[in-house]
Image (tube, rainbow, N blue to C red):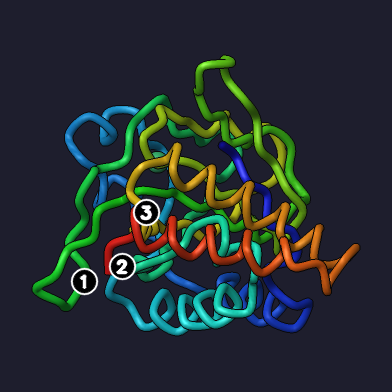
Amino acid sequence: MLIPIPEVLTKTELETIQSRLAGAAWEDGRATAGHQSARVKHNLQLSETGVDARELGEIVLKALGRSALFMTAALPRAVFPPLFNKYEQGMSFGAHVDNAIRPLPGSPRSIRTDLSATLFLNDDYDGGELLIDDAAGSRAAKLPAGSMILYPATTLHRVAPVTRGQRVAAFFWVQSMVKDEGERRLLFDLDRAIVELGRGAPDHPAVARLTNVYHNLVRKWGEV
Ligand code: NI
């Protein structure tokens, strides 16, 4: 399931990140690629341990914390510190899969990558679509600056060549409290339905009962 999350960043946050990235030092993206993906990865990236990625990543994490849609869709247990990449004209990232387990920088811990996220940081370019393969075929995601797409990290995906301008984005992974994508999807649908029902009939006793079902399913499927 691809879940677009509109306007994750405020205008001020977006401008802060854009101006900082304009003067940042970019390096070859293959530095962090696995064996298979290094062969098809042609982009630039900020150093994972550099001060720019760390401070800008903090802004992104703070913004995610405000997003009810992100919380309910991802049910995050751990979020990988956001990374930043840039595709100049002609750059692309061929079909690849993200590593299942990623060591957290500066920590003995690792996270399991259940979900991948791309937060678009500009939109004045052509090409550069994120293409995600699922059972229905390949689906393209390209959102306005400040908006984000959340998708299962279990998918093969790629970034089409940029044909004009440059594409700048933040990306990261989420370990979810609910590992199974189907279970996460059921919880997401149930949550959306409860919210909608609660708006139309806030005092109906079924709202509380369905909310109870929701939390009992989280108890059943969630890990903390
Ligand atoms: Ni990827």
Mark nearest the camera among 1 and 2 is 1
> What residue lies at 63% left-to-right and 59% top-to-bottom?
210
Residue 11 marker: none
Residue 38 place in picture, x, y as percent: 26, 36
Query: In the image, what residue occupies the spot 58% across and 16% down?
Result: 136
User: Helix or strand or loop: what does disc 1 sit on?
Assistant: loop
Tell me if mark 3 has few (under 14), some (14-19) or many (20+) residues whose alpha carbon lies within 10 angstroms of its own. many
Q: Is residue 200 left or right of residue 32?
A: right
Q: Residue at x 65, y 63 (%)?
A: 69
* Residue, disc 3: 178
The amino acid sitting under disc 1 is Pro
According to the picture, the residue beneath numbered tag 2 turns out to be: 48
Q: Using the image as rendered, state which of residue 187 and residue 210 is in the foreground.
A: 210
Task: From the top left corner, tell me how far across and down residue 201 is, in percent.
Answer: 88, 65
Element carrying mark 3: loop
Above or below, comparing residue 29 to residue 39 in the picture: below
Assign ligand 1 to one image quadrant: top left
Label 2: which secondary element: loop
Q: CA distance from mark 3 to mark 2?
A: 27 Å
Residue in the picture at 78% in, 50% down = 124
- Amino acid bearing label 3: Val
- CB under 8 Å between callouts 1 and 2? yes
Residue 169, image quadrant: bottom right
In the image, which is nearer the foreground, mark 1 or mark 3?
A: 3
- Give the position of the N terminus as an image quadrant: top right
Q: Nearer the viewer, mark 3 or mark 2?
A: 3
**Mark seen at residue 105:** 1
